[in-house]
Image (tube, grey):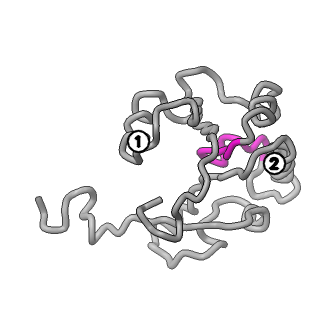
Amino acid sequence: MFELLQFSVKKAYPVIYLIPETSDRPFRKRCEVFRIPADDRFIARTITEGASLKLTDPDLLEAVRQLKPVVILDTARRFNSSSDTNSDTENQKLVANIIDLRAAGAVCVIILHHATKAANQKKQAMTLENMLSGTGDFGAMYDQAYGIRMDENLYNRGSRPDGD
């Protein structure tokens, strides 16, 4: 990941990547940029395949039992069935669903999550509290959390630093 030694892959696992906000073509381009292999070790489900799978879907749970994969949820909000993302009690449904994925055999569950709008607009220093929109319970359920932000001065919104 990002060609950093501390993120080197020691053992490869199958991946189930669920991304209901994106269609196949743009997601495939993203995978190519990240050099994700196009083989049976990487299974993705986009909006192109139909409605978003619920984390309780029997077919998903059976795939997890058989493959023992890493499961990636892109983004958390699309898999949260609670009506109030700021309610700790309501968000326990998502926590329970993730625990069920782990119990079914997922090596780990990676949840992509957006920062709060205020944190993005104000360019605040990244903290667990302001990088996770919704309830503070999200921070409590993660084993690890990483914040990633583009340095707009360095990349000049997609242009090279020298302006070309």
Side of 110 where 115 appears, left or right? left
Q: Which amino acid type is marked by label 1?
A: Arg
Q: In terms of secondary structure, where does tag 1 sit?
A: helix
Q: Nearer the viewer, residue 8 or 88?
A: 8
* Residue most extreme to the front: 11
Side of 112 where 151 appears, left or right? left
Task: Tell me if residue 79 is in the magenta stretch.
Answer: yes
Could you tell me which residue is drawn at 78 percent across and 67 percent down?
Answer: 140
* Marks 2/1: CA–CA distance: 26 Å
* Residue most extreme to the bottom: 125
Q: Nearer the viewer, residue 88 or 47?
A: 47
The residue labelled by disc 1 is 30
Which dot marks residue 102?
A: 2
Side of 25 where 53 appears, left or right? right
Give the image location of residue 88, x and y in percent.
84, 59
Which dot marks residue 157?
A: none
Q: Quadrant of residue 149?
A: bottom left
Could you tell me which residue is drawn at 66 percent across and 41 percent down?
Answer: 78
Which residues fall within the magenta stretch? 69-83
Give the image location of residue 8, x and y in percent.
52, 62
